[in-house]
Amino acid sequence: MLFDVEDGYTKFENTAVENLKKIILNHFKIEHKSSLLNIFYGPTFNKAKIASLCETLALEASDDPIIARFFYDAGCHLAKMLIAVSKNFDQEMYDIVPVLAIGSVWKSWNLLKPGFLEILHKETIIRRVSIYQLEESPRIGAAVLAAKIKLGENFHSKDFRGKTRLIDEIRNIHQ
């Protein structure tokens, strides 16, 4: 957005993106937007550092309509991804869809949720969504899966299932 507005690709008032520009430059401790190219595409690319911008932006979303729109749009994209994979559901799964929320972007669920709901209300037959968060590292599940594949171990104990907690439940999507 920053590049698009300042380069004249997107029609938007330059003054409206000044706050966004200031936040991004401060977050990455740079002075010019052109330095972002090295951060995003250069040899020092660091996914975690880029992802941490989400938390910084989330703190500003209530005061900045452009930033709030980013989160709204991201919520729309999450719903569209869910709808895309739902084409593989059996009929029963449409009644309650479990979603495992992995990644720090879910810390901003309150900002993502309005866009997520708008798309679900318009474009799907999904009736309920339960969003869960892992309470332990996904590495445990990866290790169990690796043992099963490589060693032929078959774990039946529920002790090896990931522990989760419900963070949100969206009911009656189409009522």
Image: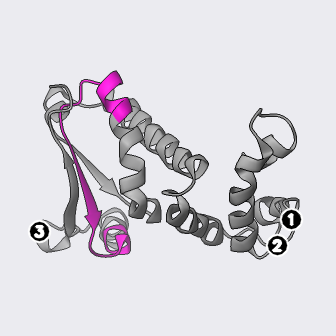
Q: Is residue 59 left or right of residue 140?
A: right
Residue wearing tag 2: 30
Give the alpha-carbon distance from disc 3 to disc 2, as whole Å: 49 Å
Looking at the rendered image, the disc whose residue lies closer to the viewer, 3 or 2, is 2
SS category of the residue bearing label 1: helix
Give the alpha-carbon distance from disc 2 to disc 1, as whole Å: 7 Å
Q: Is residue 149 left or right of residue 25?
A: left
Residue wearing tag 3: 158
Above/below status of 43 relative to 84: below
- Residue at image point 22% right, 54% down: 168
**Which portion, as a residue range, is magenta?**
118-142
Q: Is residue 89 left or right of residue 149?
A: left
Residue wearing tag 1: 35
- Residue at image point 82% right, 72% down: 30
Give the alpha-carbon distance from disc 1 to disc 3, as whole Å: 49 Å
Horizontal and vertical percent for residue 16? 71, 48
Quarter-of-image position of residue 10: top right
- Residue at image point 19% right, 49% down: 169
- Amino acid carrying mark 3 in the image: Lys
Crowdedness near tag 3: few (<14), some (14–19) or many (≥20) residues, C-alpha within 10 Å: few
Q: Earlier in the sequence, mark 3 or mark 2?
A: 2
Looking at the rendered image, the disc whose residue lies closer to the viewer, 1 or 3, is 1
- Residue at image point 51% right, 40% down: 73
- Residue 121 tag number: none
Q: Is residue 121 magenta?
A: yes
- Amino acid carrying mark 1 in the image: Ser
CB atoms of marks 2 and 1 within 8 Å? yes
Horizontal and vertical percent for residue 155? 18, 68
Quarter of the image that includes the N terminus: top right
Q: Is residue 141 magenta?
A: yes
